[in-house]
Amino acid sequence: MFSTITRCRNFGSWKNRLSRVTPVRFYASRPESIDHSLSATLIEKARKLSNEYKEIEINRSENEAHNNVNNVDLAKRFVRLQKIYNSFSNYESVYKQLEELQSMEACEADAELKLLARSETDSLRPLLLSSIEKLENSLLSQPLSHQSSALIEIRPGVGGTEAALFAKELADLYTKYANYKNWKTKIISSSEVQGTEGISEMIFSVDGEGAYGHLMLEGGVHRVQRTPATETKGRVHTSTASVIVLPQMPEEDSSSLYSPSDIKIEVMRSRGAGGQHVNRTESAVRLTHVPTGITVSMQDSRSQHQNREKAFMVLNSRLAAIKEAKEMEEERAKRKVQVSSSSRSEKLRTYNYNQNRVTDHRLGLSYHNLDSFLEGTNKFDEFLETIRKWNRQQLLTSLDI
């Protein structure tokens, strides 16, 4: 690192540039550090990967073997490293400019140039933040599915009727949030608990760009603590519901998930409450993906074609989640990682009505206005954004490329 005196001698070009800038209102001169969220470890990883990219680039140009189109792994890594190299180069360029401007401000005697250096610094800070975000994105290399629509499955866990009511409230929460984000929702399958407003299962789609990326961290066991209306002694009951968030897979992309011979299709009569609503035709559909044993049954519609379409939509999403999990080298599929059971001990988040509090247990984040949170608008959005940022930092910290 050059000394401040040495750096001050190298600002002829900045002086010429800044002298042509229209003066703005004066700020008190005070040298500041360049604040950013990149750790030294992360910067070193980015530099190491950028150097690897340059080495591969040289080898590709010198050795025809590296240009072999059949070398798929090398080609994929080259493309990824190229993104990292480009974003890191941009970050270094902006950072260097800020560093030079701040050094100029610290040692420049001309008050006007100090002022203009500060103005130029302020204009570059947003660019630094943007370059950091792009660098982090290139390092994380998130799957394309994060930009896709989502499929949400909600089921009650322990707690009987109270769990079924809570499951319905969670479904309402995500529906409200979808409306807030201008996403469209559509119920794929829903089963109500007779005599209550609760549900035994609900599957619905959330159509909107990036919906899966926004909601994927909601997958897990949610716990509610409150006094039910039927509780005569005022005791607090604890119930749970499971939430599974899956990426939607477009129908035209399903060929990458399975071959037609992998799917066993069965049709049967729907089961109903009887009377005039008894389905006398074989409209219910059950799909089985033979290699994995995944089964999807659908009977909500009286049309076999519609039930078949819905069943394939759910099956595609479940298989897409498994494919993504394998690509990320996880030992278990996303669906199993999110929810292995609905026991009270495996809680992701707690909704405590008596204390008017919601707490996410992954990072100890609490919010003390449950009614506002359950509206599914800005407060819920801010809560999810905090969790996404926390998860992003966890991924960056444990990054191993």
Image (cartoon, rainbow, N blue to C red):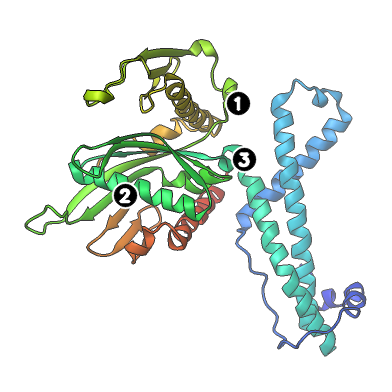
Which residue is nearer to you in this view: 260 or 330? 260
In the picture of the structure, the residue carrying the numbered disc 3 is 401
In the picture of the structure, the residue carrying the numbered disc 1 is 253
Which residue is nearer to you in this view: 15 or 188? 188
Residue 243 placement, left or right of 85: left
Instruction: Give the distance between the C-alpha atoms of the residues marked 2 and 1, in whole angstroms.
Output: 33 Å
- The tag earlier along the polypeptide, 3 or 1, is 1
Tell me the element at label 1.
Answer: helix
- The tag earlier along the polypeptide, 2 or 1, is 2
Q: Is residue 303 above or below residue 204?
A: above
For image coordinates 52% across by 53% down, the residue present is 181
In the picture of the structure, the residue carrying the numbered disc 2 is 169
Query: Which is closer to the viewer, label 2 or label 1?
Result: 2
- Callout 3 amino acid: Ile
Residue 347 in sight from this viewpoint? no
Residue 71 placement, left or right of 9: left
Q: Position of residue 14 (x, y in %)?
A: 88, 74
Question: In this view, which residue lies farthest toward the top?
Answer: 261
How many numbered badges does the structure rendering display? 3
Tell me the element at label 2.
Answer: helix
- Callout 1 amino acid: Asp
Tell me if label 2 and label 1 are in contact, CB under 8 Å: no
